[in-house]
Image (spheres, rainbow, N blue to C red):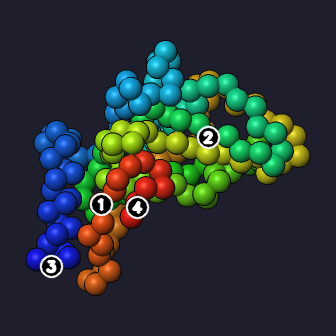
Amino acid sequence: MSDFTEQEKKAKEILNTIPPYKTRGFEIVKDKFRKHPDHNILLPLRGTSKSAGYDFYSNENATIKPGEKHLFWTDIKSYMMQREVLEIYVRSSIAIKKDLNLCNQVGIIDMDYFSNESNDGNIGICLRNVGIIEIKIEKGERIAQGIFKSFLESDNCNSEEERTGGIGHTNK
């Protein structure tokens, strides 16, 4: 069986976990994987009808000192169609007004991160303070935005590896 056919088979298995009437969107992770079980989780929303990005909200109050970072667990997972990805970016207002950036510059949420066995696809957003004063983030504040995008695959660089967990578990 060719790599391409094997990847198609794995993609179909993942797609089978998504209800047929859904194409892309967000859900709250299963209770046992929630980091904020007592908090009312806000699903990402676009700020306006013309916005590309879906805003992600902080579920906690946090203070980030200069040079330090903080990982915000959203308790949200994202589903999407084959050959799509959710890219996470810092909101421009957070970067410009508060000197915060994403530790990995752009977060990549792959299709197979959804409902993985380690954390059910819980999206974590890690912000670093690159400024000179400590920054406070309030519970409910918009901290990042996600944009769904399509991507292309090459003819000969496909993997047969399967995800075995959450963040950092691809190809382990």
Check contact, mark 3 vs mark 4: CB within 8 A: no
For discs 4 and 1, the disc positioned in front in the rendered view: 4
Q: Residue furthest top?
A: 38
Residue on which the image places disc 4 = 172
Q: Amino acid at mark 1?
A: Glu
List x then y, in percent, for residue 157.
32, 80
- Residue at position x 37%, y 32% in the image: 29
Q: Earlier in the sequence, mark 2 or mark 3?
A: 3
Q: Earlier in the sequence, mark 3 or mark 4?
A: 3
Q: Amino acid at mark 2?
A: Leu
* Position of the N terminus by quadrant: bottom left
Of 43 and 168, the residue lying toward us: 168
Q: Amino acid at mark 4?
A: Lys
Tell me how far mark 4 sits from mark 2, CA to CA: 22 Å
Q: Earlier in the sequence, mark 3 or mark 1?
A: 3
Tell me the quarter of the picture where residue 27 sits: top left
Residue on which the image places disc 2 = 71
Of 159 and 76, the residue lying toward us: 159
- Residue at position x 60%, y 57% in the image: 104
Q: Amino acid at mark 3?
A: Ser
Of 73 and 20, the residue lying toward us: 73
Q: Secondary structure at mark 2?
A: strand
- Residue at position x 30%, y 72% in the image: 159
Name the mark on residue 2.
Answer: 3
